[in-house]
Image (tube, helix red, strand yellow):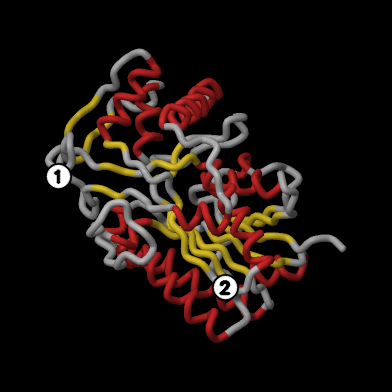
Amino acid sequence: MTEDAVLITGGAGYIGSHTVLACREIPRPVVVLDNLSKGSRHLVPADVPFYEGDAGDSKVIAEICGNHRIGAVIHFAGDIVVPESVVAPLSYYLSNTCKTRSLLQACVDHGIAQFVFSSTAAVYGQPEAIPVNESAPTRPANPYGTSKLMVEWMLRDVARAHDLRYVVLRYFNVAGADPLGRTGQATPDATHLIKVACEAATGKRREIQIFGTDYDTPDGTCIRDFIHVSDLARAHVNALDYLRDHRESQTLNCGYGRGYSVREVLDGVGRITGKPLPIRVAPRRAGDVAALVADASRLRSIFDWVPEHDDLDVILRTALSWELGQAMTR
């Protein structure tokens, strides 16, 4: 019997497209749903069933379930820019919270019992201790983090009331690109530090800004735990395997357990390219916290997850390679 397919919402986006490739390597059949507001159709292999639509649209979910035997959902679709969430909170509660509520209702209606959710370390706010583990208080400092935490609460409650099991993956800072160059971050006007730095290094941007140099960190700039996108994609495959074999839901941090400051990252890009980046210091951004570093020991132990790209230079080189390829095709 053919294995049930995985519906990947936001599968034409950055992390979603990498996870499509990771699922195919198992192999596990996938179906992609994306409204293409941020994703790119060309990042999805041509032989993967693709539906253009919204994850919160019950009609398109019903169409997909009518055409394919869906056994699990990996939910990426949503908005992710912290400063934008501060000025447009209702938009984030609609996109990230309300639409996920509709998707969960569709899962219940169609008997889909396995759900992997793309959450964020922003649910912690400014943690009391570094590294932060999953038992730390959740006190988001911005509407983005709150909108994701509300979905975590919904998943908890839905799992108690219905036959649904879930894995929540709380991402720290995702970066890099597929080492084989098949996909990467193609989001227009991206705000991720390493993506922006690579665009500055390849001439797509005139400069890169450092938002705040007065944080309580060794060099005054924010510290983040950067995880390579391919390692993160494999964690989603591990989550599917886990849900197939276990009844207990899980919430897990996704990071490497070490942090790098903004200046360290920018210095690394300059070292690899052989020339310093054009940098401008700017005021702090609303909603940013000084430091976020993961305690990812539960991810490693529960999934037997061993990262393959746990090296800042590897992350930077794959991101730069993707950006150079994009520059050549423009």
Q: Are marks 1 and 2 in contact (CB under 8 Å)?
A: no
Residue 234 vs 178, above or below: the answer is below
Q: Looking at this view, is 124 or 256 the one in front?
A: 256
Residue 34 placement (x, y as % from top left): 58, 55
Secondary structure type for disc 2: loop
Q: Looking at this view, is 18 or 103 the one in front?
A: 18
Residue 113 placement (x, y as % from top left): 65, 74
Which residue is pictured at 65% across the width and 45% down the height? 22
Q: Disc count in the image?
A: 2
Q: Amino acid at mark 2?
A: Glu
Where, by quadrant of the figure, is residue 52 drawn? bottom right
Q: Residue furthest bottom?
A: 161
Which residue was labeled with disc 1?
A: 216
Where, by quadrant of the figure, is residue 273 drawn? top left
From the viewer's perspective, is 261 left or right of 163? left
In the picture, the disc for residue 323 is none
From the viewer's perspective, is 189 left or right of 221? right
Which residue is pictured at 56% across the width and 63% down the height? 116
Which residue is pictured at 73% across the width and 53% down the height? 28
Q: Amino acid at mark 1?
A: Asp
In the picture, the disc for residue 248 is 2
